[in-house]
Image (cartoon, grey):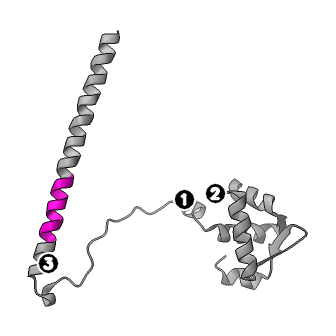
């Protein structure tokens, strides 16, 4: 039984070695292509150089649930306070976490301080709330 496991492990190692060799070969080819591209660009007169930027790899559209979790912490705070009138810091962080965003209470605290300095939120007695609905809308909520 141990012999079969050893052979499987050796086969996997061999496959990994082959894959790594192929990757190294492809990286070398890419580097050579980049060199050739720079040489061609250097030989072209400035008037013939392409005016459009290099092609970018198209990205798949993100599902709405992923896009929502990637909002800024400030936007998430504004959204939570918009739904809950006023909350203490810990509850704001908990609500953001419930919505699927991994956030630390220190990050929420720092962001609340920045939003407060911009006049978007205010606090009193450890309770945070939106300063004005119109300011929250201007901030992108």
Outermost residue on the bottom side: it is 47
- Mark 1 vs 2, N-terminal side: 1
Outermost residue on the left side: it is 43
**Structural distance between the alpha carbons of marks 1 and 2:** 10 Å
What is the magenta range?
A: 27-37
> Please, what secondary structure does the residue beneath circle 1 have?
helix
Mark 1, other Cα within 10 Å: few <14 / some 14–19 / many ≥20: few
In the rendered image, the quadrant that contains the N terminus is: top left
Of the two numbered discs 2 and 3 in the rendering, the one whose residue sits closer to the viewer: 3
> Residue at horizontal 26%, vertical 74%?
54
Residue under pointer 1 = 66
Q: Main secondary structure of the magenta part?
A: helix
Q: Position of residue 110 (x, y in %)?
A: 71, 68
Of the two numbered discs 1 and 2 in the rendering, the one whose residue sits closer to the viewer: 2
Mark 3, other Cα within 10 Å: few <14 / some 14–19 / many ≥20: some
In the displayed structure, 113 sits above or below 11; it is below
Mark 2, other Cα within 10 Å: few <14 / some 14–19 / many ≥20: some
In the displayed structure, 33 sits above or below 5; it is below
> Please, what secondary structure does the residue beneath circle 2 have?
loop
Mark on residue 41? 3
> Residue at horizontal 76%, vertical 77%?
116
Q: Position of residue 12 (x, y in %)?
A: 28, 28
């Amino acid at each position: 039984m141990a012999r079969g496991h050893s052979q499987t492990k050796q086969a996997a190692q061999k496959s990994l070695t082959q894959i790594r060799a192929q990757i190294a070969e492809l990286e070398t080819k890419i580097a050579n292509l980049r060199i050739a591209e720079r040489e061609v660009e250097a030989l072209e007169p400035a008037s013939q150089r392409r005016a459009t930027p290099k092609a970018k790899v198209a990205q798949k559209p993100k599902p709405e649930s992923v896009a929502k979790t990637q909002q800024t912490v400030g936007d998430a705070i504004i959204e939570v306070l918009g739904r809950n009138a006023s909350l203490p810091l810990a509850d704001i962080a908990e609500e953001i976490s419930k919505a699927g965003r991994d956030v630390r209470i220190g990050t929420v605290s720092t962001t609340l301080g920045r939003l407060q300095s911009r006049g978007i939120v205010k606090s009193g007695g450890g309770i945070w709330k939106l300063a004005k609905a119109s300011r929250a809308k201007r901030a992108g909520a």
